[in-house]
Amino acid sequence: EGGKPDGLEGEIPSVFVPQLPASVIESHFHFGVLNRPESVRQLLASPALLRQITSDFVLVLETDHVLMQPIPNLATRTTPAAFTFGYMHAHASQDWVIQRYWPEGSSASLDPVGPSPLLIHLDQLRAISPRWLNFS
């Protein structure tokens, strides 16, 4: 809660960072999900926090996810693994936005996945992190 240990961190190794200030969230239409890419940015910028990561892969979860069984690591060094959300698909009318950032891309080329849960290699997370907050 609020970027502080909640007593459950003994079950899953966890890293805690401060949340964005309320004024920043308010200036972005109260889009609190901005804390996710900001948290990853803070993690990657902190040698002390990075020392807590003992795997080459990182599991990004939301605070309200309940894990009923272990999650297999289906990610590789070059391909992350994410949960499919059937309602999070791009539409052809959004191609102009997609092509602004990915000129050869299209809505048909995007997987219907959300940013959480996500299993990703630490090197890939480093590569996407600088642009993730801006895209959000």
Image (cartoon, rainbow, N blue to C red):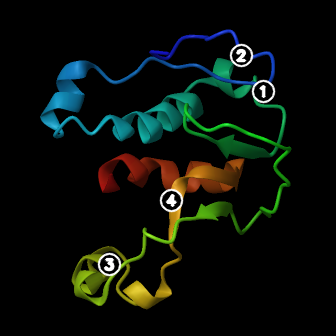
- The answer to which of marks 2 and 4 sits earlier in the sequence is 2
Residue in view at x 55 percent, y 38 percent = 62
Residue nearest the observer in this picture, 79 or 74: 74
Distance of label 4 from label 1 (alpha carbons): 21 Å
The residue that label 3 is drawn on is 98
Amino acid type at image mark 2: Leu
Please tell me the numbered disc located at residue 12.
1
The residue that label 2 is drawn on is 8
Whether residue 105 is visible, yes or no, is no
Q: Which of the 4 image quarters holds residue 79?
A: bottom right
Please tell me the numbered disc located at residue 114.
4
Are the two marked residues, 1 and 2, in contact with CB atoms closer than 8 angstroms? yes
Are the two marked residues, 4 and 1, in contact with CB atoms closer than 8 angstroms? no
- Secondary structure at numbered mark 3: helix
- The answer to which of marks 3 and 1 sits earlier in the sequence is 1
Amino acid type at image mark 3: Ile
Q: Nearer the viewer, mark 3 or mark 4?
A: 4
Residue in view at x 44 percent, y 90 percent = 108
Residue in view at x 37 percent, y 78 percent = 90
Location of residue 130 in the rendering, given as x and y in whole percent from the top left corner: 44, 48
